[in-house]
Image (cartoon, helix red, strand yellow):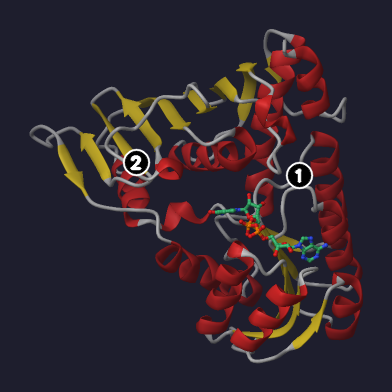
Amino acid sequence: MRSQRKYTVVVAGCGKRGLHHAEAFQKNGRFEIVGLCDINPERLAGAAQQFGNPATSQDAGPLLRLTKPDVFCFCTLPSLRREMIRLGVEVGASLIAYEKPIALSTNEALEIMRLTREAGVKTVVSHQHRYGDHYQKVKQLIASGALGRVHTVYGTATGWMMHMMTHLIDYTRWFNDNAEAEWVVGQAAGKGKFSDNHPSPDYVAGIVQYSNGVRGLVECGEGAPDVPEVEAWWRKCRLGAQGTEGFAEVLTGGGWRAVARDSGGVISGPGNMDYAHDMPPYVQQIADWLDDPARVHPCNGENAYKGFEIMMAICRSVVQRGKVKLPLSAGEPELAALARALPD
Ligand SMILES: NC(=O)c1ccc[n+]([C@@H]2O[C@H](COP(=O)([O-])OP(=O)(O)OC[C@H]3O[C@@H](n4cnc5c(N)ncnc54)[C@H](O)[C@@H]3O)[C@@H](O)[C@H]2O)c1
């Protein structure tokens, strides 16, 4: 019998994404927001008013110890991950939901995975664009076999690495049935974005060899291809698959298109990334996984780690040159090594 009890939730970080999450939890009906946290008192007060005045604090630790939620959701900037994970594990949360990227280095990501695996805490990472109807259509075309044998999956974005690259890798891995990556080769350029709150090289490109023989191509940042069909700059992302009998691709802000076996030419349809559309199923599948351990969330942390590992291997390849084999073990923090290796 599946339990239908409500799961309690604390949301930390009440900025753009924290509010998206809180809204989706509140509207779902299977969750009760019992605490909100932000270091910014105005944001915290505004969120508390919006979400039924639960307990609030500017410090996640005491709030978590007070409320002991089933779900700890944090939506802070990328510099704040390991400590939040540690707090969630310490108070015995069943599931931690957090934002991409999962960390800023392999060392930090390995520590996060160790903490959560040892404690048996489920994790979910917000690569939620996949719920878009246009993303689903491309996945469905690939899975139907209508492209023949898929040999290449690709993703580009004009946004920079720590914002966009794990999105690109996560969805193209999904198009390729989450095959393991064997090795990657990477190249990067430009140091302007290392001082950003999503620190990254200005441009980065990677080639991924997947264990099923499929080639992955991924590219983002300044100099990645424009997607002229899409006006919204952050949505200039093109992700797709090529097979022996056609191709299918999604533009984050511009629908999908394909040529497939028996399609009789180009077929296409609409679609635009929309948080209001994509967050409800993402949150519903959190309830599903908590209800039933067999219903593993598609955005589970193990998958997110695989994508993050590919991104970090690309960075290591820039520094070390040549092919970097996966899995990665601990090593020099990738961003510092990159910043040193790239010319001014
Ligand atoms: N999945 C997506 O589609 C998507 C889209 C945009 C952003 N993001 C990611 O979401 C994350 C957050 O981005 P955002 O745009 O919501 O940022 P934001 O700046 O709007 O919100 C971050 C909030 O965290 C708060 N904060 C900082 N330190 C804190 C602490 N110690 N405890 C509690 N709160 C703290 C800040 O005051 C701020 O309100 C980033 O990792 C970003 O990459 C994901």
- Mark 2: few/some/many CA within 10 Å (<14, 14-19, 20+): many
Residue 114 x/y as whole percent: 86, 49
Helix, strand, or loop for circle 1?
loop
Q: Is residue 154 visible?
A: yes
Q: Where does the C terminus fall, quadrant-wise?
A: top right
Q: Which of 95 and 192 is in front in this view?
A: 192
In-image side of 203 versus 155 (left or right): right
Residue 282: percent from left, percent from top: 52, 65
Q: Measuring 64% from the left and 91% from the top, which residue is drawn there?
A: 52
Is label 1 within 8 A of ligand 1 (CB to nearest ligand atom)? no
Task: Give me the disc on residue 103.
Answer: 1
| Distance from mark 2 CB to nearest ligand 1 atom below 8 Å | no
Tell me which residue sits at (38%, 35%) in the image: 238
In primary-sequence order, the first of circles 1 and 2 is 1
Side of 165 relative to 274 (left or right): right
Q: Mark 2 points at which residue?
A: 251
Q: Residues within 10 Å of mark 1 (few under 14, many from 20)?
A: many
Corner quadrant of residue 17? bottom right
In the image, taking residue 68 as reference, residue 48 lies left or right, namely: left
Pick the quarter of the image with the N terminus.
bottom right
> What is the three-letter code of the residue carrying label 1?
Ala
Q: In this view, does 311 lie above or below 270?
A: above
Placement of 182 over or under 19, stated as above or below: above
177 or 231, nearer to the observer: 231
Q: Position of residue 113 (x, y in %)?
A: 80, 49
* Amino acid type, mark 2: Leu
- SS class of the residue under badge 2? strand
| In this rendering, position of residue 235 left or right of residue 20 | left
Distance of label 1 from label 2 (alpha carbons): 26 Å
Image mark count? 2
| Quadrant position of ligand 1 | bottom right
- Residue 69, image x, y percentages: 78, 80
